[in-house]
Each structure stands twice: as structure tokens, then as C-alpha cells.
Image (cartoon, helix red, strand yellow):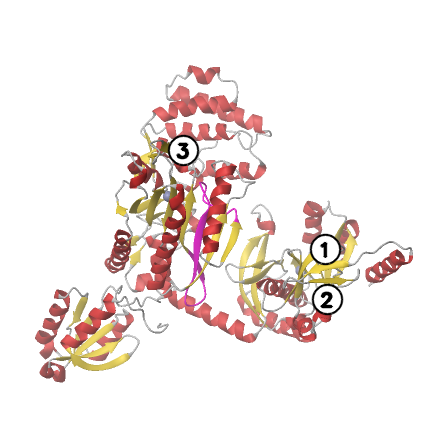
Amino acid sequence: MITLRFSAVLRWLGWFLGRKDTMITLKLPDGSAKQVAPGTSARQVAESIGKRLAQAAIAAKVDGAIVDLARDLPAGEHSFQILTDKDKDALDVLRHSCAHVMARAVMRLYPGTQLAFGPVVEHPVPGFYYDIDSPTPIREEDFPRIEAEMKKIVEKAEPFERFERPTAEARGLCADLKQTLKVEHIDDDLKQYPSLSFYRQGEFIDLCRGPHIPHAGKIGAFKVVSIAGAYWKNDSTRPQLQRLYGTAFFTQKELDDYLHNLEEAKKRDHRVLGKQLKLFTISPMVGSGLILWMPKGAIVRGILEAFIKDELVKRGYSPVYTPHIGRLELYRTSGHFPYYRDAQFAPMYTRPAAGTLDICQYRLSLGDLDDKRETEFVQYMKLAYFLPPEYEQAKTQAEKLELVHRYTLTLLQTMQVDLPDYRKASNAKERADVLLKWLAEQEGFLLKPMNCPHHIHIYKAEQRSYRDLPVRLAEFGTVYRYEQTGELNGMTRVRGFTQDDAHLFMTPDQVESEFRANIELVLHIFNTLGLTDYRVRLGFRDPASTKYVGSDEDWNVAQTALESIVKTLGMNYSVEIGEAAFYGPKIDFVVKDCIGREWQLGTVQLDYNLPKRFDLEYIGADNKPHRPIMIHRAPFGSMERFMGILIEHFAGAFPTWLAPEQARVLTVSEKFTDYAQKIEAQLKAMGFRAGGDYRPEKIGFKIREAQLEKIPYMLVIGDKEQTAGTVAVRGRSEGDLGAVPVAEFISKLEREVREKRLPAAKAV
Ligand SMILES: [Zn+2]
Ligand SMILES: [Zn+2]
């Protein structure tokens, strides 16, 4: 309150003293401009535009930054937008505000609770969490109590009031509130700011940057979702806290839909269905993250592969095959090694100890590392069971490099390798160069992390003229990545996977048409599978990062080209900085499944760099050598991931053209086995995947079993059917479809498969 009055006085004083307060200019989303007086708040602007807008307003966006409605607008010219419940940004503001409400409820129920951070998250639930340290740990049984307390707070609809304090005073206030974690946070990270902001809601005061909703009554519906362990500032050396997750929406209906989808997601979990339907398995004995495709899963995969192969041949692709490993030199040239080595299986050297020298070389070549990279590198070395003695205790980068150097000398001696140039070298860089030269002469292989270098060498195997271009090489190529154990998840995060990969080599004037054709191919495949809700993400380079190869100029050309193609195709897209592949920008297709979850699938990438690194050429019309441009693309991404997503999308009930078993003949009694077997044989002879259940079981039991296996059609055979030469058809989702002559059923099935028809409804 004091701050408010004080600032009002200042404003008035400024005006009184004749200080020229110029008007604020706001550029509104519709392109118009609006002038407002200094001291105007975003809420006042909303009110001046219209009563309905003011009522719907949640927060405002000023020059891209989201601010409270009550904040005074800064001087000058700004882009300005009122956020309502239609905006995703507003939902985030709502959810974070609900985190305050949850913390307030917890404080009431568990006095003495320490609060840490309460941000908005998308995973594992779209909502928020608050990290807390309460005197009695919170359990799931406590959620209803917390929710009941939150309900009281929401019903009172008290405002969120912002106030600022100079940092020293802010620290004092946190100490008075007995919030020691907040005090620690100020000491650790916030000392450099002159003042800090707090938000008060009733008796609850929280150190927070904001922004927030105007009052708690805007929270239409909320739920406390789960509780997990967490560390203070996510640092495992710091105290353990509890992370209480919740979610909030503007309306009860949105929350209900969300909870319904959550239930649906559980029913559709591909790890559960994969086991139940015998599609795939993972054995710790084989290795985590390594998928074993069981016969039924293999059938589905085979059909998907055949489908895409057909499309590729139609579109002028040439299928190729390449091995699962390649020489390290190949990946040193491509840049896949050593930069991505933390995500790769260890290299295989014929002299095993060379692998250790390889790590020394890598560390020496990196020179001085910043803190973040240093931590990452120590983690990597620990994972490889390679950490030079005393490395972690060394204080400076120079000391660390010296330790690695001495370790290298010991290794060279043990391996009886004499490298005079190494001894002569005077700094880390020179030493790294000598070691690299030696390593390059050793026989070493890598499980392939990508197929591109292999395909590049197929391109290079022949002299190419501009008349041969574009060259389109396609392969279901299996690659390996060493994902962390904690990251592995069923089929969607694995360590070995098969990409539906292809590499296209073309002249600059073919880039646009090839790119277009690729986008069309991806969309054709998605449409065929009923994945019609998708968005496009352009992944651009982060110019500040060192993980990318190639010149600024190539990057600019590639990024501009890509954006203009997407624009001319009229696609909805967003640009994401830092999401590029290391050799070039890319388009990712993010698909929404039938319960609204987003999955990143197909990707098309433009590459000006690898052709340069591998010195690729074609002879142009001018008889001179030119550099081709490459496209990398994989519409499914990987067969494993795609299968996982399809299992969830279809809830295991694959469309008939993909189903492992398309029809099963079921007999009412053993009397009809001969007739039934003839029908099964007839279906098989026509190329359908048919089965039969002739056990002396009740027909109801047989139907239930086939239903659980999600077989599209059950053909029931009894006396009537045998006499009339028909089958009584049951659809897994439609139920009884009546009796039809066998030939009629077969022609219906044939049509459904040929047209790759999709199941009519969301059948579970
Ligand atoms: Zn806050
Ligand atoms: Zn590639």
C-alpha cells in the first residue's frame, strides 16, 4: 500500500515539476495504435477497449513479456495484447497462480512448511508444482484436504497484490516469514537485483517474479495430481523436498476432459498393450532400451515398411542396405564423433586401451571448459569408468588438462606406444592433434548413430552428373544411441531403433521441389494413418551454441530457404531456436493423437554442411564440379517410436490393413470344424491373416478372447451358417453384423484392406 501511494506521489510530483511525461504508444494485435497517459495500467487499457474484454482479461503481454493487469505500463512505444482464457500464456499464468493457492492451503494445513519454487510445467502433467518441505510429509490421502482448503481460497476470490522491496529488506521479510529457502535463494542468486517483488494474497505472501491472475476467482477448476521427491534447486547434494503437482483450468469442463484423457492414456499405454497383445518385449538380459519385436508386432511393422517402400518407389527413391557399424574416421569426418559421444555407445577399438586414449584425446581437444560443460564431462567420464586420479580435486582448467596429459603419458607407456611428437608437444591442443593422428591409424568402429555417412559413400561411389540428380537413397537403417537408463521408455525412448531414413542429393534449384515433395509424402503417410492433427516446427540453430558445424552463411541460406518453402506451402509453423540438427535446420512434424497428446514424429532436414565435409560433387551442365545439397528425412522418425505411438493412438485396435490377425473363425461346436477350417484356409489363400478357434469352449468365451486380442472380425460358424454357406460376422467395435455369404465377406475385407480404411470411432 505504501509503495502504491508513494509512486502516485512521485508521478504527481513529476507532472507538477513540469517533467515532460510523454504519452505511451501501444501497438495492438489488430495493427492499430493506442495512446495512453503515463500511469495507465493494462487493466485500464482493457476497460477502455471494452467491458467484455476487461472482464475476460487475465494478464497482458507487453513487448512479448507477460505482465499483471494491475501493473503500470512503461514509457515509450510497445506491442500490447490483453490475454484472455483463449491464450495458452494466460493458462500458464492461471496455473502458476494456482500454485500459490496450493502453497497457501498447504501452509494453513501444515504450519511451518518451507516453500521452494512453484513453476508451471508441461510434464509429467500439464500444470504446476510447488517444491515444499513440510514438518509432516504429505501423502496422497491428504490431497482431498488440500483441495478442500484450496476451494475455500478460490471461492473468496481475493486479489493477488504485487509489492516490491529493496533486496536487503526483501531478505528480511523472508526471514520474518520464516522462509529459510527463500532467504537462501536470495543469497545465492538474487543479490545483484536492487529490489525484489512479492505477491500477497490474504495472509499469504510469497517472493515471486509473477505475473499472476487478478484474483483467485479466475481459477475455474483445479486438482492436486501427485507427489514426488525432489531436491532443493534440483541439486542432489542439497536437501530433499517434496514436489506437489497440480493442474488448473479456466473451466470445470476442461479439467474433466483432461482427467478423462488421462484415464484414456492409461488404458492406451503402449507398454501395457504391447505386452497384452504380444507385440513387443524388452528383456534385461538382452539390454534395456533394446526392443524385441514379437511375431504380432513384426507383422504390423512389416506392413508399415511395405507401405512406405511402395510410396518411395513410386516417388523415385532407390532402396539401399548398409551395415550397422562404420569406421570411427567416417564419423570424425561427419562430425557425429566425438561431439555426440555422450549419447553414443563406446567406440570399439581393436586395441581396447585405445578407447581410454580416445577419451584423453577428446578431453585435451576441448581445452578449457565452462562450469556446465565441465560437470557434463565429469559425468561422462564417470559413466565410462574413466576419471584421471585427482581430476575432480584440481582447481583450474590448466591443472585438469595437465592431469589428463600425465594420465595419457602413463597409458602410452603401458600400451608400449612411443609417440615422440606427443612428448614434444607443448600444449593441450597440440597434444590432442598428435593423439588424434595416432587414433586415426588404429582400427576403431562405432555402432552407427546415423545412416547419413553410409549413404553419402554410396553417393560417392559413382561419378554423378546433374542429369542423375536428385539421387534419393532410402533405407530402414538401424541406429544406436546410448540414452540414459532413466530416459528409456517402452518403445518411445530406446537405445537401438530403425529409422525409415532417406538421403536426397540435389542441385540448388531442386531444393524447393524436393522439400515440397517430402512434406507431401509425410502428410500422405499421416493422413493414411488418421494422424490428421499436426503442427510444424522449424528447428533453427542457436547462434550462441558451439554444437553446430558449418559456416554462418550456409546456415542463413538454409534457414531462409526452409522458412520460405513452409510459407509458400501456407503451413502453420513456429520457429524454435536451438532445435536444429547439428548440420542444418529442420522441419519437425508434431502430431496430436486422438486424445490430444502431442508426439514429435517425422522430420525433414536441409543440409549444406555434410556435402562439404565429405567433399561431394556432381558435374554441372557447365562441365564443372559443383557441390550438391542434401536432405535428410524420416516420416515415421523410427519404427519403434512410431509403433509405440500407433499402439496408443489406436488403443491396440489396429485398422484391418495393419492388424496382426484380421479375422478369426470361431466354431459353436466341434461339429463345424471342417467347414470352419475350409473358410480359414480360403482366407489365408487370399492373402489374409486369418486364424481359427476350434476348441471345445463356449462361443461367448471364444468371442471375448478374440475381442481382447482386438481382432477386427470374428466369423462365427454354427448350424445355420454351415447349411447356408455363410459366416456370421462380428466386428470388434460394431458387434453383430449379421450373416453373409463367405464370398461377400471376403470382398468386403479385400476392399477395406486395399483402401487402408481406418476404424470409424475411437474404439477402446
Ligand atoms: Zn508467483
Ligand atoms: Zn541423415
Viewer-closest of 656 and 693: 656
Tell me the tag on residue 45. 2
Tell me the tag on residue 613. 3
- Apparent side of residue 168 relative to residue 602 in the rendered image (left or right): right
Under mark 1, the amino acid is: Glu
State which mark lies toward you, 1 or 3. Answer: 1
Q: Position of residue 87 (x, y in %)?
A: 59, 65
Q: Quadrant of residue 108?
A: bottom right
- Between the residue at mark 1 and the residue at mark 3, the CA separation in whole angstroms equals 47 Å
The residue pinned by badge 1 equals 77
Quadrant of ligand 2 in image:
top left
Tell me the tag on residue 57. none
Q: Secondary structure at mark 3?
A: helix
Q: Is residue 637 visible?
A: no
* C-beta proximity under 8 Å, tags 3 and 2: no
Q: Which residues are magenta?
A: 577-600
- Between the residue at mark 2 and the residue at mark 1, the CA separation in whole angstroms equals 14 Å
Q: Position of residue 419 (x, y in %)?
A: 41, 17
Q: Secondary structure at mark 1?
A: strand
* C-beta proximity under 8 Å, tags 1 and 3: no
- Apparent side of residue 117 relative to residue 187 in the rendered image (left or right): left
Vertical placement of 232 versus 506: above or below? below
